[in-house]
Each structure stands twice: as structure tokens, then as C-alpha cells.
Image (spheres, rainbow, N blue to C red):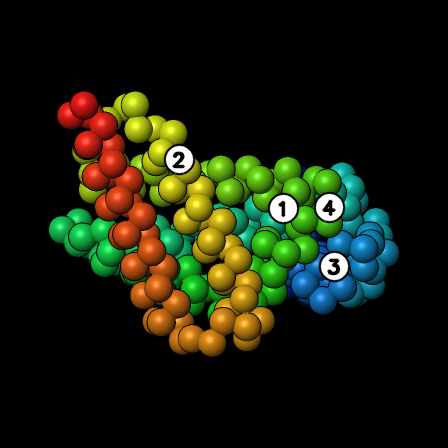
Amino acid sequence: MSPRPYGGVTADRRRADRRAALLEAALDLLAAEGVRGTSLRAVCARAGLNPRYFYENFADLDALLTEVHDRIVTEVAEAAAQGVAAAGPDAGLRTTVRSAAVAALGMSRADPRKVRVMLVEATASPVLRERQAAARRDYTRRVIEYARTFYDIPPDADARVQFVATMLVAGWNENVIAWLDGELKTTLPGLADMFADAAEALATHAAAHARENDRL
């Protein structure tokens, strides 16, 4: 038998709400205090929950932090994918990249905590560093897949394409942090333009180099 509703709210709904509160509390603390300031006790206090409810949802603090991080990674990837779709199937590389960048930056600006946790604070945790590295590899793979839809890249150019894609992903991360911190003085559309220009220039150069080598 299912537990009876309490105050009109089912047990499953209350548990889901507690889980959401713990995730939000961890996100708040990670962004404001960093990994060192995000303890199990601090998370429970911020969420207003007894520690027993923590263990109802997570095996340990690392499990909670991993879920916070991975949810952000998924949100960014989904936002970028929506931007790609919005550009349309007939759009060129620059238009597609710019649309993806605008969508991802919009998500970043809407909640800067998430980008700070994913790109900055995660480096202080061994567990999150591994997740961060996995996310970079996944984003790089996505960039390579997009590049191959625009260019006929021969197999022997894989290393060069991966090199360029890695530079784009790493450059994106650093510039987004600088933009959110106010060090990079530009607008959201301006930053999207810069990234689209860089992506087009690097991809075009890499593809041309690959074709030249293929003719030799």
C-alpha cells in the first residue's frame, strides 16, 4: 500500500521536493563557498532538512555534488542543441555555432551559479574534476560531430580536428568565465559572434589543411 498523503501531498512528492531542496542548496553553496564550504551539514542546514533526509536521497556528499554537476552539464548541452536546431538544417557553420552559443550563454546568464560550479568550483573536488574532464571530452566529441556535418574531413585528419575542437571547448570555457566575471567587456550577442567567428576560422583552416594533405 502507498503511504497516505500528508496535507494533500503524497509521500513521493514530498521526497522529490526534499531531493530538489538538497540539490538547490548544494548548488548555492558550491557557487558561493566552493567545495570546501559545501559539507553535508551545511547542505542540510541550507535546505532546512534533517540529515536523515539526505541519506534518503544520496549515498554521500560526493553523490550529491556529482548529480549537481552532471545536471548542469546536461542543461548546457541541451541548450546548445536547441540552438543548433533553431538555426535550421540549411544554416552554415557560423550561423549554427552562433545560434548554439546564444542559447548556451542565455542559460549561463540566467543562472551564473551553474557555470561557476561547472567550470571553476569543480576543479577543487577530485570527484568533480573527473566529471569535468568527462564533460570536456563529451563537448569536444559533439563539436567534432558538428564539424563533420559541414566538411568532408578525411580520417587521417582526426588528430588535427580533435586538436581544433579541444581548443574551441577550452577557449569557450575560459571566455565564458571572463565574461561572467566582467573581465571580458562584451554583450551576449557579441560573445556569441566572437565564438562563431573563431569556430569558423579554425574549422575552415583545419578542413583546408586536411584537403591539402589529402592531395599530397
Spatial separation of the CA atoms under disc 3 and disc 1: 16 Å
Query: In front of the other: label 2 or label 4?
Result: 2
Q: Name which residue type carries label 3.
A: Gly
Mark found first going from the N terminus, 1 or 2: 1
Q: Name the residue under label 4.
A: 125
Q: What element carries label 2?
A: helix
Q: In which quarter of the image is the C terminus?
A: top left
Q: Where is residue 174 in the image (x, y as percent from the top left)?
A: 53, 57
Mark found first going from the N terminus, 4 or 3: 3
Q: Name the residue under label 3.
A: 34
The residue at the point 66 percent across, 42 percent down is 129
Mark found first going from the N terminus, 2 or 4: 4
Left or right: residue 4 versus residue 213 is: right
Q: Name which residue type carries label 2.
A: Gln
Q: Position of residue 83 (x, y in %)?
A: 31, 57
Q: Mark 1 points at which residue?
A: 67
The residue at the point 63 percent across, 56 percent down is 120
Spatial separation of the CA atoms under disc 2 and disc 4: 27 Å
Q: Name which residue type carries label 4.
A: Ser
Q: How crowded is mark 1: few (under 14 residues within 10 Å), some or many (20 or more)?
A: some
Q: Where is residue 70 in the image (x, y as percent from the top left)?
A: 57, 46
Left or right: residue 84 versus residue 139 is: left
